[in-house]
Amino acid sequence: MEASAADGAATAAAAARTLRWAGRAGHLGGIPRAAVISTIGAVAKAYASLLNTTTVHNADALLRLVSSRPPGTPLLTVSNHMSTLDDPLMWGFKGFPTTDAKLQRWVLTAEDICFRNIFMSYIFRLGKCVPITRGAGIYQDHMNEALEVLTTGDWLHSFPEGKIAQDDQPIRRLKWGTASLIVRAPVTPIVLPILHSGFEKVMPEKAFFGRRPPLPLWGKEIHIIVGEPVEFDLPSLKQAARTVPKDSSFERKGWPSIMPDGLDEAAQRWLYQRMSDKIQSVMETLRKRLLDLKQH
């Protein structure tokens, strides 16, 4: 009884801190959301299109899917993560509807960074951010919230590497949360990879006395390359996953013992790893292509 009460109190405290109600489209008639997204979008547009030089390759692939994909079909974009300002600055390039609150993405954000107090929580919620608790696993309540975004056919952005890396190195091993969302979504989302470079110069982690600068820097070159949708043969992958031997040694961390598709934990892990490997491979190919484009 005491444990249940403690869990209930913790859940209530988390809900109060993350202010999910502020992220609803109808909150105060949508006016606060429109104001925040318009303001942040204008700043992103200024830094990406005016104060820095941004080159985008294959931008039409992103623009088309953001504005005119089939009704009810969710979009899941994935990218590398080079600074705290990748989002929203990466959407500020010329021609992108940065200030349109309806078309703007939802994005997975670190709860310990973006939701540290009530004021920050409110602003980030209005900015269509979904908090993710580090270390709480891929079946945490916030991931269920992200799944709801895809269920309604909206656009969700993810940084599947899970943390910032400002060195120009190969794409690191991806976290499994993105793959789990693809599998669990009622309608399989369009998965679109994006690679960028230059934001690590706009907001370096250790620029001034080992700290980030107080404001984003300018006069830098930003390069963005949009790939083509990554396709998954989910029925075949799930069938292969069912043949994976069971292993009871896993630390569960809230994983369901059996998913609706009949996949136990070992099968889920195998499936998410294979899908993450494919996304990582595509992102690494894009990274190399972007390096080549920058040299010519």
Image (tube, rainbow, N blue to C red):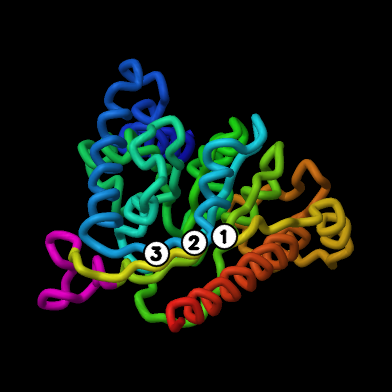
Which x, y percent locates residue 193? Answer: 57, 60
Q: Are circles 2 and 3 on residues that touch, CB within 8 Å? A: no
Which residue is under mark 1? 193
Helix or strand or loop: what does disc 3 sit on?
Answer: strand
Give me the disc on residue 55. Answer: 3
- Neighbor class of circle 2 (other Cα within 10 Å; few <14, some 14-19, many 20+) is many
The residues bearing labels 2 and 3 have C-alpha atoms spaced at a distance of 16 Å
Q: Name the residue located 26 percent from the left edge and 72 percent from the top edge.
A: 201
CB of mark 2 within 8 Å of CB of mark 1?
Answer: yes
| Residue 7 forms part of the magenta stretch | no
Query: Of tags 3 and 1, which is closer to the observer?
Result: 3
> In front: mark 2 or mark 3?
3
Marks 2 and 1, Cα distance to the nearest angstrom? 6 Å
Q: Position of residue 180 (x, y in %)?
A: 64, 52
Disc 2 marks a residue whose amino acid type is: Ser
The crowding category of the residue bearing disc 3, from other C-alpha atoms within 10 Å (few below 14, some 14 to 19, many at least 20), is some
In this view, the residue farthest toward the top is 29
What amino acid is found at the position of numbered circle 1 in the picture? Answer: Pro
Residue range highlighted in magenta: 201-216
The CA span between labels 3 and 1 is 17 Å
View extreme (front): residue? 296
Position in image of residue 99 (x %, y %)? 33, 37
For marks 2 and 1, the one nearer the N-term is 2
Q: Earlier in the sequence, mark 2 or mark 3?
A: 3
Q: Going 45% across and 42% down the picture, which residue do you hit?
A: 105
Question: Tag 1: Cα neighbours inside 10 Å, few (<14), some, or many (≥20)?
Answer: many
Image point (49%, 63%), residue name: 57
Which of these two is toward me, 123 or 8?
A: 123
* Residue that carries the numbered disc 2 in the rendered image: 79
